[in-house]
Image (cartoon, rainbow, N blue to C red):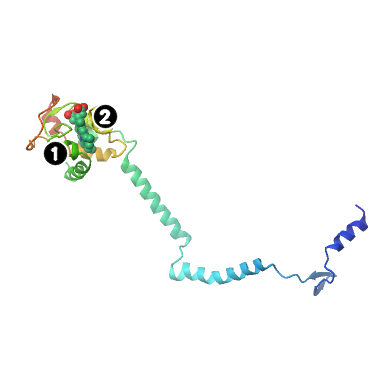
Amino acid sequence: MTMSENESKTNSTVPDEPIISGHSYDGIEEYDNPMPGWWVWLFIASIVWSPIYILGVHQFGFINSYEDDLSEQQTELVEIRAAFEAANPTATVTEESIAAYVGVQEHIDSGAVLYSTNCAMCHANNAGGLIGPNLTDEYWIHGSKNTDMFTVITEGVLEKGMTPWGAFLSAEQRSQLIAFIRSVQGSNPEGAKAPEGDMAVAATEATSEGL
Ligand code: HEC
């Protein structure tokens, strides 16, 4: 590209009668081009917004500050973590860890609520048994230890109609249910089903263990 070609190209972009702003620095002059409309409106909008924002954050509090947002989300995080820990997915459940729930009134009460919502339709309100076996006697089909019950409640016995609860109730809730079942041991309710399974090995020990 020769010099003259280059010049004529540059010249062609210059308006016929350029509006010059009128000042000249070292011989350099400036066109007086207006700013594009969208830019001007954005500029005006940001000026209008700024006092609203300042008052909203610092005076009236209807706009959250960065610290507000942060603490809100941290609270949420604490709640999510607490819920996760309450669900106790990784906790090792042992005979003793369940025994710690047995005989504790608070856990028995929570267990009773869980029982009446989830279990009573099959094991009867008084736990004397309906479709499912009597849970108040000392006979157990699947074993009388806390961990035996925990396994049955967690995994269910699908072919016999006992639902698995592992995915719906936390380890703590399942332990509270056992606390409830232990609390109605020997209550001998009216209309209770006949015993099924084997007599508990050292049933009295198992019952009184956590008391
Ligand atoms: C849909 C009916 C049904 C529901 C709901 C149900 N169960 Fe059962 N459950 C059964 C049946 C049936 C059996 C007997 C299983 C077998 O014969 O192997 C059983 C067995 C059991 C056993 C073992 C009893 C033994 O003799 O070894 C326990 C403990 C138990 N259920 C607790 C619960 C708890 C706690 C809940 C509520 C979270 C519950 N069940 C909800 C039907 C049910």
Q: Which residue is mark 1?
A: 183
x and y percentages locating residue 162 in the rendered image:
23, 32
**Quick one: SS at disc 1?**
helix
Q: Secondary structure at mark 2?
A: helix
Residue visible at 72% across and 70% down in the picture: 34
* Quarter occupied by the C terminus: top left
Dividing the picture into quadrants, the one containing residue 142 is top left
- Residue 11 in picture, x, y percent from top left: 87, 63
Q: Which residue shows up at 69% across the image and 67% down it?
A: 36
Q: Quadrant of residue 170?
A: top left
Q: Earlier in the sequence, mark 1 or mark 2?
A: 2
Quadrant for ligand 1? top left
Q: Residues within 10 Å of mark 1 (few under 14, many from 20)?
A: many
Q: Residue at x 32, y 39 (%)?
A: 88
Query: Picture coordinates of residue 134 (x, y %)?
Result: 13, 33
Tell me the residue that label 2 is attached to. 158
- Other residues around mark 2 within 10 Å, as few (<14) / some (14–19) / many (≥20): few
Q: Nearer the viewer, mark 1 or mark 2?
A: 2
In the displayed structure, 207 sits above or below 29; it is above
Check disc 1 and give the amino acid type: Ser
Q: Which kind of residue does numbered mark 2 sit on?
A: Leu
Can residue 211 be seen here? The reply is: no
